[in-house]
Image (spheres, grey):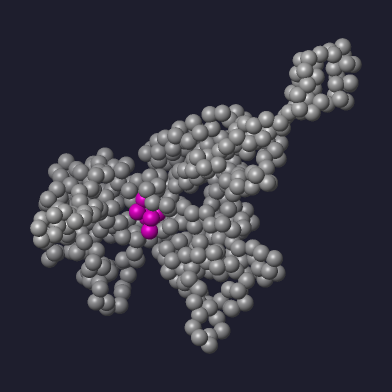
Amino acid sequence: MLTETIPLREYGTALVDDDLVQLVDESFWNELKITATRRPKEAQWQLKADALSGIARYRSTDIDLTVVIEPKLRGADVLFLAEHAYGQRGQVLRRPKGARVGIDNAYTDPIAALLIWYVDTVADFATRWLRRSYRTREIVLTGQVRGRFLVSKYMTQSLATGRNAEVPCVITERTIDTANNRLLKAGLREVAKLSSALAVPAARKAVKTAVNSALPLFAGVADTTIGPSEIRATSTRGPERHYASILQTTNDLLGGRQLGAQTGTNQVSSFMWAMPALFQEALRGILESSEDFTVESKRPNATIYDGAAHRLSSSKIDPDYVLRGADGVMLFDAKYKESLRFPSSDDESLLIGNNGPKVRVSRGDLYQMAAYRQQPLWFGAETALVYPVVLLKGQALPRPYEVRGIGATILLHFMDVGPNARDNLASFRERIRPMAT
């Protein structure tokens, strides 16, 4: 069997042999959003990653392939983002269909995005698949026989002790109170316990709300302490085969095996983070936790009319975040891009910076922010783009940059997502606070 590991970076490329590509099902590449192309007469294929980061594995009789995709921002702390991405308005965590992967260490600390993802997955599964299924159990009836009569037990336990009317039987009944469903309900209970240890108060509340919404789906399922015998009692055969993935994930959760950063020996299900959505949802969580402003959900529309003033269509004007502070409205957009670096000249970008690092900013992003504040509800609104940066120990969070000349000033804010992100979070909040006052 061929054993290979392919290292990639978000939006990066790697060259692989034709034999390897032919051994891997096309659906695996599609799930990872990896495009495989080969020019005529070239021996190797080029694999190009998209906006997913994580570890996934493909196994068959011919190949054992592990794909490791790192974030494009070198040193980015994905789990810091996951701690704050509890809103889940975008699909930030994905579990590709594939073999289990080995990771370097299991993160036993609870992660908000993972817990929310698990609860939503169980709720979706229960809504679709939670049906009455067959369960076989032993019972003792009085003066009657149902199902299969256990003659040997009747002779040795009932007759031998003078309890002739007690009839041991094995019956098969339809119920949702099965070993599989008990394990899923135990998983939800475990999530409720883990939520108490989350660092972000709003994340704790969001996870508990999600659990409370999912538990009524299991109202007919008994609460059970899960041990080895309960796990052995579960089944993924025949009509229960659709439980395989969700039971495996639940066992990982109950066993404290969640996620890792690099390959290793701890086995978990393959996982991928949708990085732009993860950054956007993490920033949303951080903004929603602020006491200086509130995050609004309503958005106005832009409407198209024909020459006779008949309404043709409308579309939502949708900046990532609309914040309302003491003095009015602020409009923020999250931009998951490498901004603080020295770029090559490009007609599609502006290079901003003099004494500090230069910043690459898309003209389209600036025009979009300038257009947002033309909406009557947002006249005079403060506007800002927020970029992720990875800071080394001792580096200070850059002060906001300003873009002038497109109407009112547009601010460029930076949020640390590197190994020191937790220490620099207070600085980021201080940077945006003046916009609210």
Q: Is residue 23 left or right of residue 198?
A: right
Query: Left of 97 or right of it: where is 115?
Result: left
Q: Which part of the image, by quadrant, shows the C terminus? A: top left
Q: Position of residue 431 (x, y in %)?
A: 25, 52
Q: Hey, which quadrant is residue 99 in on the image?
A: bottom right
Which residue: 63% across, 38% down?
180
The residue positioned 63% from the left and 36% from the top of the image is 133
Taking the view exactly as shown, the residue that stands out farthest to the left is 308
Q: Which residues are magenta?
A: 276-282
Q: Quadrant of residue 416?
A: bottom left
Q: Residue furthest bottom?
A: 41
Quadrant of residue 25 within the rendered picture: bottom right
Q: Nearer the viewer, residue 135 or 78?
A: 135
Q: Quadrant of the N terminus?
A: bottom right
Q: Nearer the viewer, residue 374 or 331?
A: 374
The x, y position of residue 151, in whole percent, is: 86, 25
How far across and down, in percent of the image, does residue 100 sit?
Answer: 61, 56
- Residue 313 relative to residue 146: left or right: left
User: What secondary structure predominates along the stretch shown in magenta?
Assistant: helix
Residue 51 place in picture, x, y as percent: 42, 63
> Which is more toward the observer, 263 or 308?
308
Res 193 seen here: no
Camera sees residue 19: yes
Instruction: State the residue at coordinates (73%, 28%).
Output: 171
Q: State yes or no: residue 252 in magenta.
A: no
What residue sits 78% from the left and 21% below the top? 145
Q: Is residue 98 above or below residue 231?
A: below
